[in-house]
Image: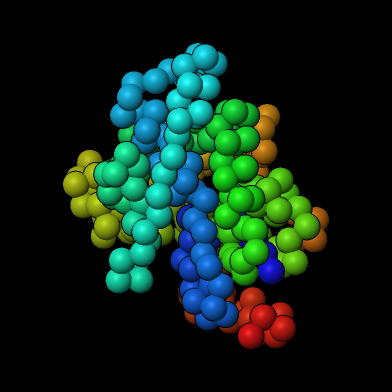
Amino acid sequence: MIITIDGYIATGKSSVAKKLAEAIGFIFFDTGAMYRTLTYGLLKHHINFHNEEDLKKFLDSFDMDVKIYRRERLYFYEDEDVTDKIRSREVTEAVSEISANKAVRDKLILLQRELSVGVNAVFEGRDMGTVVFPNAELKIFLIGRNEIRAKRRFDEIVQKYPEQAKNLTLEQCLEDINRRDHYDSTRENSPLVQPKDAHVIDTSDLSLDDVVNKILESHASLT
């Protein structure tokens, strides 16, 4: 069984998907981290992704690995643990544009579908229920008020990545949220769109447990 969780940035998609997967014994896939790892690779090797030939060479050889350590997922690229590095401001600023590239999406969509074969999994992202898994058995779409999402993103960066947060302001996070929303929703390839058959949940005033329980209560067959 495949469950997809899509939605806007900072609505809690990864946390909800991870906790839901743990609650029902499914595998959790954070597809955003996959795009971030690929973006990190492009930046590391100073590859201009607008150059189709250079991008193709990179994608043909691109590979990554996900390892579990003490119940946490670690992301590796070229045998390097990049779990923290893919959350850097440099990667964050570049990932939306790079992930909108058709060749990049085709590469990772293929990888995501390969990972889904024969497993029960929760896939979290922005086009899981519309493009990658249009026939998923259950689709969730998370939304939230912009100010709430900006505060969540700001607090997350301050807590997890204090070095990046030194010159960061809440206003900058809100500007970034608005920019990402517009870009993700209007991009040509795989734009962020609510699946017609998705269950929509506004996470603005809900805790993580509230959101997960809301999904479980509405779909008792999952437990």
**In the picture, residue 24 is in which quadrant?**
bottom right
Relative to 2, 19 lies left or right: left
For the point 73% across and 49% down, which residue is it? Answer: 130
> How far across and how far down the image is residue 145, in percent?
55, 57
> How far across and how far down the image is residue 148, in percent?
47, 59
For the point 66% across and 32% down, which residue is it? Answer: 189
Relative to 117, 74 lies left or right: left
The quadrant in which the N terminus is found is bottom right
Asked whether residue 206 appears in the rendered view, the answer is: no
Q: By what rule are the colours in the image chosen?
A: rainbow
For the point 76% across and 53% down, which residue is it? Answer: 134
Q: Is 179 rendered above or below residue 57?
A: below
Asked whether residue 52 appears in the rendered view, the answer is: yes
Q: Is 178 rendered above or below residue 221?
A: above
> How far across and how far down the image is residue 191, in percent?
66, 39
Q: Is 177 rendered above or below residue 216?
A: above
- For the residue pair 202 and 147, the one nearer the viewer reads as 202
Residue positioned most to the right: 196
The quadrant in which the C terminus is found is bottom right
For the point 47% across and 46% down, which residue is it? Answer: 34
- For the residue pair 157 and 190, the one nearer the viewer reads as 190
> How far across and how far down the image is residue 49, in percent?
48, 21
